[in-house]
Image (tube, grey):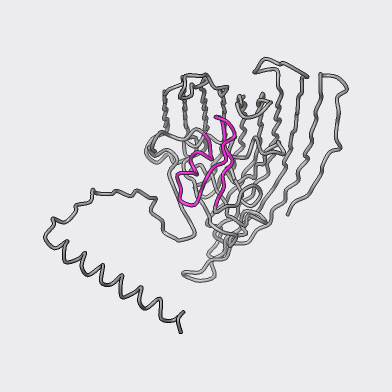
Amino acid sequence: MRYMHTPSLLAIAILAISTNASAEDTNQEPTQLSTQVVTAQATDSVLTVVTDPKAPRQPMPAHDGADLLKSIPGFSVIRKGGTDGDPVFRGMAGSRLGIILDGETILGGCGNRMDPPTAYVFPQAYDQVTVLKGPQSVQHGAGNSAGTVLFERATPDFSTQNVQGEASALFGSADRNDQMAHVLAGTNDGYIDLNGTRTDANNYEDGDGNEVHSAYTRWSGNAALGWTPSRDSRIEVSGARSDGEARYADRGMDGVAFDRSNAALTVEQTHISDSLLELKGRVYRNYVDHVMDNFTLRDSTGMKMVSNPDRETIGANLSSEWALGQTTTLRTGIDHQRNNHRIRSASNMMNMMMTPDIDGVAR
């Protein structure tokens, strides 16, 4: 009974104190709180977020894919130096979060994820970023229990003008400078699409004025040649190349190379019949060559070491969309992916040690 009685007495005492305080406050002026402004991306679905990577952002535009994603609620970033970061969505990262570039799966080479897929993304080079939350969709491969992020470019449209272009530049502290240029030219019969980016920064100074080993540089180039024999048909051949380097103050090795090469072929046909709305196929190859060492970008004080992982990803996918009714559609497809992942390392540049290739077939 004592256990039950004690909380009742406490409740009465608190009520009395609150009542007296309310009576005293009646003669005081009400407190005016300052206006709070909350800015968030508008969504059409609770499980889908669509954002414009070219839109202005605070404190400044993102220079890699993870930097852009952290502005979306639910995302955080594990920084991997100045040049890139590893995105985390709802506490899940790595293979749980799929990153798709132009419909293609890209995977980094480093086993410690020093080059996650977002390290090869300059956001302003894309027209739209879509976040699909959760594992509900299987359109973009197996897994992806956290979700899928799509970095997409819009289909060229020459209804208003035949030559289009844009450019941007950013300058900041620590000599940071970003540049992006995009040129699109074509007619109703075909087009050429060129895109180039570069981002660079020097070492910054900490609060005590000490220089921090943190400089980085990264560049990328994309080219696409398309043929559109009709309004509903498109055949595109595309390629990409990028590279960079990054200094790391929190570890004993630096990123000397983030070399990526890509080639792809895309075929698309729409409005085939009243039932078959779309048929789309793609084959692609992504190759990532990543190098880390402790002597190229810093003074070596001991044994020289180098690590050189690489990964080749070859994939293909075919999808179709069917009309089952006025408001109901069915999307079907199949995709294939093969990875060849290696790690090569050496100490004192002698006795190069090789590990067996890791071959795997996914999906």
104 falls in the magenta region: no
> In this image, 300 relative to 229: left or right?
right
* Image quadrant in which the C terminus is located: bottom right
Q: Which residue occupies the foreground of this view, 313 or 67?
A: 67
Instruction: Spot the residue most to the left.
Output: 27
- Residue at figure coordinates x 77%, y 19% from the top left: 304
Query: x%, y% of residue 267?
Result: 61, 46
What range is drawn magenta here?
64-89
| Residue at x-position 52% and y-position 23% | 200
Looking at the picture, does residue 305 appear above or below residue 130? above
Horizontally, residue 15 falls left or right of residue 53, namely left
What residue is rendered at 74% in x and 38% in y? 312
Residue lying at the far bottom of the rendered structure:
1
**Horizontal side of residue 238 vs 207, given as left or right:** right
Q: Among all residues in the image, which is located at the extreme front?
A: 2
Of residue 186 and residue 126, the one placed in the foreground of this image is 126
- Which percent across, then down, holds residue 48? 48, 56
Q: Decide: is 1 above or below 299.
A: below
Residue lying at 59% horizontally and 41% vertically, measured from the top left: 86
Horizontal and vertical percent position of residue 292: 70, 26
Q: Is residue 12 above or below residue 146?
A: below
Image label count = 0
Q: Where, by quadrant of the figure, is residue 353 drawn?
A: top right
Q: Position of residue 256 (x, y in %)?
A: 67, 23
Question: Residue 71 appears in which quarter of the rendering?
Answer: top left
Residue 261 appears left or right of 322: right
Residue 68 covered by magenta stretch: yes
Task: Note whether 46 is above or below 236 in the view shown.
Answer: below
Q: In front here: 205 or 177?
A: 205
